[in-house]
Amino acid sequence: MTDPAQTVLADLDSIRSDLEDFYQDLHRHPELGLREHRTAKKAADALRDFGYDVTEGIGGTGVIGVLANGDGPTVMARADMDALPVRERTGLPYASTATVTGPDGSEQPVMHACGHDVHVTCLLGCARLLAQHRDAWRGTFVALFQPSEENGEGAEAMIADGLTSRSPRPDVVLAQHVLPYPAGYVGTRAGSFLSAADSLRITVHGRGAHGSMPQAAVDPVVMAAMIVVRLQTIVSRELAATTPAVLTVGSIHAGSGPNVIPDRAVIELNVRTYDDATRTHVLDAIERIVKAECEASRSPKAPEIERIASFPPTVNDEEPTRRVAEAFAAYFRDDAHTVDLQTASEDMSEIPAAFEVPFTYWAIGGIDPERYAEAAKKGTVFQDIPVNHSATFAPVIQPTLDTGVSAVAVAALSWLGS
């Protein structure tokens, strides 16, 4: 019996040039979250050309394309579309020079620093090949292009705009992400894969005074400094060494001059955890420490603790992950791996949760294999290999795109091709 994946992917050579051109165009024209109008239109136009039933504008700029091909399972595959406010420093001939006007009126650079242009291109490549080989599979394929993953807003926006009533209900949801592994690599992981992320803004209040008269003040700078130091003990002293978690204070703002004690300080921090119990423990500990330090410092007003962003953990369901891992092992052979636990975060899992269906999410590599091997040999991977969100992060075009297209197709066909 002919392998459906081999049949569908036999035409990958014939569309490779088109995909590479499409990818470079997306990379040159990145768009920030909920502004992906050009990207969404290009995805929608391509899907229509392939024969899909297309719905645009879901949650602002979200797009779905539906290809019904007889009785069988329904598989949804998702790609995120948004870029980041980063000035590109890759030196590539197709590097982004795009800018937008920021909230404060200043010019803001934009770059595909996380590989979402890879995700869009690969999903469209799979969608095209499935449309060209309807004889090799049965069921319904749904290609979903999501806005604003970086801000954690896009999945929720699509759901709030009626995604579950505007799309066929899938039996499984699939997604992938390009990461700083060698190009050609594919990696699956059952259970916890990506962390939950919570970003907090903490405002502590003091009493301002002249810098020469500290006895008249309640110094919020010292208060904030003590809080920052004490927060480091949550992971190191309250969690078991085998429990992964990260707490990073990324921003402190206070005062306007060297000789003025201000009346408040603002701390912004980010927490990464992998299960609800740890997440609750860390967030409760932050609140406990902040309140206690403010009390110890004689703060005249209770602190304000705001959650400014939140991402759920990505916990892959066992059965679909097993199925995809077996399919990858058969197709990619030695390039199929079990990927490490990742500290990055995603909102993709909100989509299968809204449909109440299982999902699996995997990684593909995007780094030149020779460059990666050289860094690994020297033990300098973390120093020499650019990671997502870096101004120098740019996946090599091949074999990254071939691998990404093949991975989505192989995964989808482990349902549709049976």
Image (cartoon, rainbow, N blue to C red):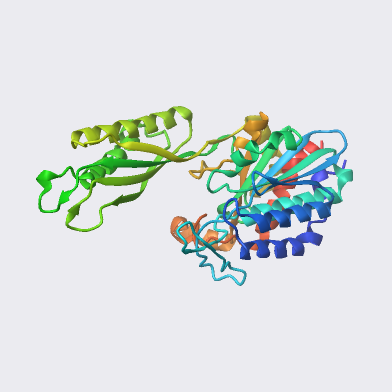
- Is residue 332 shown left or right of residue 197? right
Q: Relative to 31, is 135 above or below?
A: above
Horizontal side, residue 394 vs residue 237: left or right: right
Q: Position of residue 209 (x, y in %)?
A: 16, 49
Looking at the rendered image, the quarter that the N terminus falls into is top right
Which quarter of the figure is the C terminus placed in?
top right
Q: Residue at x 47, y 61 (%)?
A: 105
User: Is residue 220 at all visible to an observer of this figure?
Assistant: yes
Q: Is residue 10 visible?
A: no
Q: Position of residue 207 (x, y in %)?
A: 19, 43
Residue drawn 70% across the image and 53% down it: 122
User: 417 above or below 357?
Assistant: below
Could you say where residue 389 lies in the image, as x and y percent from the top left? 50, 55
Judging depth in this view, the residue of 383 and 31 nearest the camera is 31
Give the image location of residue 385, x and y in percent: 50, 59
Camera-nearest residue between 86 and 18: 86
